[in-house]
Amino acid sequence: MQFDLRSFLENARVPYQAHFLADLSQADFGSFALSAPAECDFSATPTAEGAALLLCVKAQIEAECARCLEPIHRQYDFQREYLVRMRDVEDPDFELPCQEKGCLDLNELVFQELVFEVPAVLLCSADCQGLCPICGKKKVAGCTCHSADDAAPVDARLSILKQLLS
């Protein structure tokens, strides 16, 4: 969805509001994916200096726990506020995703904000211990192996490091 920010800054006298679905199913988020299009509300309000923008996002993500590989389903509900002036739109280093004509790409803005909102490393729980390196079972789900220091096979390629420590 596109929002003509330049035109709004030049001519707007009344607030603008829009509700839209941001389909980011093809976007590469790295460690997670959206399970459905993000539900978004966008508003722009004229101010004496420019405009106050508000973006509200509700998104459901799917991922795997970084330690135990269990599926994770989480909902993120957040909002971002921006203050924009005409000189910001003219600036080539403007932080919002604007095209040369001054149109704000709201789908790209939602993508960027989701990248910042969702942690890079997702865990099923804060105390997840992960998988046992010996048997491959979740450590909290009945792994009966000895401690990793006693029973884990030593990689022969790393034996030189053990000699250096002696």
Image (cartoon, rainbow, N blue to C red):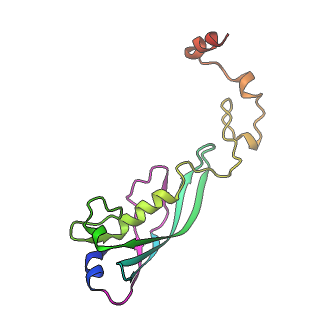
Q: Position of residue 163 (x, y in %)?
A: 63, 9
Position of residue 30 measured from the top left corner of the image (x, y, whole percent): 45, 50
Would you say residue 62 is visible in this rendering?
A: yes
Point out the image quarter for the N terminus.
bottom left
- Name the residue: 25% across, 67% down: 90
Please give left or right for residue 63 compared with residue 93 in the image: right
Please tell me which residue lies in front, 89 or 58: 89
Q: Would residue 35 be counted in the magenta stretch?
A: yes
Quadrant showing the C terminus: top right
Q: Is residue 15 above or below residue 109?
A: below
Left or right of 60 in this view: 20: left
Q: Nearer the viewer, residue 10 or 54?
A: 10
- First to last magenta residue range: 12-37
Residue toward you, 70 or 163: 163
Q: Is residue 8 above or below residue 31?
A: below
Name the residue at the bottom extreme.
14
Q: Is residue 4 visible?
A: no
Above or below: residue 161 compared with residue 140: above
Q: Is residue 94 left or right of residue 52?
A: left
**Prevailing SS of the magenta stretch:** loop
At a point 58% along the width and 11% down the height, the residue shown is 160
Residue lying at 75% horizontally and 36% vertically, measured from the top left: 143
Q: Position of residue 123 (x, y in %)?
A: 62, 50
> Based on the displayed image, in which of its 4 quarters is residue 158 positioned?
top right
Percent across and percent down for residue 3 are 31, 76
125 falls in the magenta region: no
